[in-house]
Image: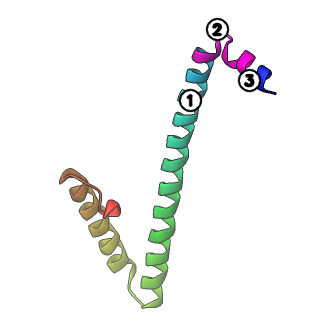
């Protein structure tokens, strides 16, 4: 077993191959993280809308709250960080 590992790591093309695999893995992790964050954001917004509907709020009120939420998250990012980060 030990000799096969040393043979694998002594191959001259292993370093570029490992670099390519690591770059692909980092990109994939970044993509999946972004998709998970967007999914969670949609889940939270849907739950908020459902709660506002159960309280009897009108569509105009819900739209105003959602628009204010979007505006505050954008201004939070401009100020140096997302509200979701805190």
Residue displayed at 58% across by 34% down: 25
- Residue to which mark 3 is pinned: 5
- SS class of the residue under badge 2? loop
Quadrant where the image shows the C terminus: bottom left
Q: Is residue 69 above or below residue 80?
A: below
Quadrant where the image shows the N terminus: top right
Q: Is residue 86 left or right of residue 34?
A: left
Mark 1 burial class by Cα count in 10 Å: few <14, some 14-19, many 20+: few
- Residue to which mark 2 is pinned: 12
- SS class of the residue under badge 3? helix
Q: Residue furthest top?
A: 12
The image's mark for residue 22 is 1
- Is 9 one of the magenta-colored residues? yes
Which of 47/54 is in front?
Answer: 47
- Is 36 one of the magenta-colored residues? no
Q: Are marks 1 and 3 in contact (CB under 8 Å)?
A: no
First-in-chain label (1 vs 3): 3
Tell me the mark number nearer the camera, choosing from 1 and 2. Answer: 2
Mark 2 burial class by Cα count in 10 Å: few <14, some 14-19, many 20+: few
Which of 60/24 is in front?
Answer: 24
- SS class of the residue under badge 1? helix
First-in-chain label (3 vs 2): 3
């Amino acid at each position: 077993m030990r000799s096969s590992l040393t043979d694998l790591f002594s191959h001259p093309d292993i370093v570029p191959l490992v670099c390519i695999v690591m770059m692909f893995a980092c990109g994939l992790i970044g993509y999946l993280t972004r998709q998970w964050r967007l999914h969670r954001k949609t889940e939270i917004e849907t739950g908020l809308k459902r709660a506002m509907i159960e309280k009897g709020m009108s569509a105009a009120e819900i739209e105003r709250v959602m628009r204010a939420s979007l505006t505050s998250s954008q201004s939070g990012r401009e100020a140096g960080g997302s509200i979701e980060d805190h």
